[in-house]
Amino acid sequence: MEKPNSSLSPQLRLLLLLVIVTASSRCRAENNVVGGRGKQSTGVAFFIFGDSFLDAGNNNYINTTTLDQANFPPYGRTFFNFPTGRFSDGPKYAKLPLIPPFLQPGNNIDHMAMGVNFASAGAGALVETFQGDVIDLQTQLGNMKKVGKGLRNKLGKEERDAKISGGVYMFSIGSNDYMSPFLTNSSSSLLFHASSSRFVAMVLANLTAVVKDIYGMGGRKFVFMNVPTLGCLPAMRLLMKNPNGKCYEEQVSELAKLHNARLSTVVLPRLARELKGFKYSLFDFSTSLHRRMTHPSNYGLKEGEEACCGTGKWRGIDSCGGKRSVKKEFEVCNNPTEYLFWDSFHLTDTAYHQMAREIWNPTPPPSSTITKTSPLAIVGPYTLHQLFHAAIHH
């Protein structure tokens, strides 16, 4: 049960994780770019793949554990005012209708014409990542193909092709692949022990294969989020027992750095060279998070390391809601808007809302947050706004 706190209002105790994007013993989050209320549609379909940073509730409808769900308090209060399992707070920037999770009961092809959310909390690019508890990326691709077939039956080939080619495809994937060997004894642990370089290559190869499949269906506009410095998440700090209290830079963070370097300098530029008409936006989630951790006050925050909800040091025990651990008690901070981290793996609504603006149409960050290893531009070569505009005139 939640520890009593007389100064904490019900609204502030419960915070929805706005998806945009990491980790959940696995990766969950909210998607401030995807799914708003009462907005006029742009006409551009938005198709979403990945993990809990973008999961809008698909895990409500599969046989999984509470580690990969958020359909219980204190999640959900700031958008729907009750827990839904949706980690998304909507394309208020893209002016899209609420993007439904693929598995939501009652869905039909009319609901999916403006886009679908296939993401699953805990999912990875590798089938072996939390296998049996999540909807892996290959299965998400298969679900996209079902939607494509349904659109053709409903709209005809010409309209279906226009919908697919004009659509925008967003991915948040990789964090769970790199965390799972440290969190479980899953079969992905065996792959990890091959070598860091080979392990990262397998993750990126699987992502590349899915992107090429969607390109083959007609998709041309893609959005990617890199993975954060995973050793800085409160849960991973606690797990790794780093004695100096700093981010755990070895192993899991090194995998994230290698992934991000290859994604930005090798994988995406190569796809742009090889695939005619391929356009992409890459959001440097890692840098965006690091800036807020090291300079929280520049972003209106007071706490950049400790989570708002959970227990233990840094509130790094994933006990928020009292359903994910033996210990049912959990603590919630007085004012989540002052925190960077909401729970042991995820960020607050405030942080995700800021990042949503960065993905959509970024403005220069505070000058004090820019270093040689933290570049000015964190979105490129296109912004999400530009991709939606380009898609409209495809």
Image: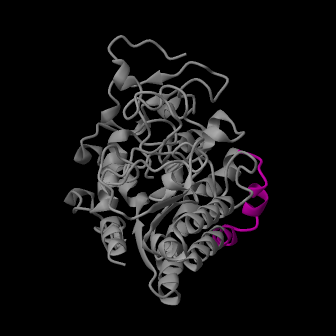
Q: Residue 194 or 87: which is nearer the viewer?
A: 87
Q: Residue at x 44, y 48 (%)?
A: 19
In the image, taking residue 246 as reference, residue 104 lies left or right, namely right
**Residue 389 percent across, percent down from the top left:** 30, 70
Q: Position of residue 29 (x, y in %)?
A: 48, 45
Residue at the (27%, 57%) spot, across then down: 369
- Residue 1 in sight: yes
Is 394 within the magenta? Answer: no
The N terminus, quarter of image: top right
Q: Nearer the viewer, residue 118 or 307?
A: 118
Residue 298 point in image, percent of width and height: 23, 48
In the displayed structure, 383 sits above or below 302; it is: below
Q: Which colour scheme is used?
A: one colour
Screen quadrant of the C terminus = bottom left
Q: Which residue is drawn at 59% across and 47% down?
A: 121
Q: Magenta segment: does it hold 195? A: yes
Between 372 and 271, the one lying in front of the other is: 271
Residue 242 visible in this rendered orientation of the protein: no
- Which residue is drawn at the image coordinates 59% and 37% (left, top)? 69
Q: What stretch is highlighted in magenta?
A: 184-202
Image quadrant in which you'd find residue 82 = top left
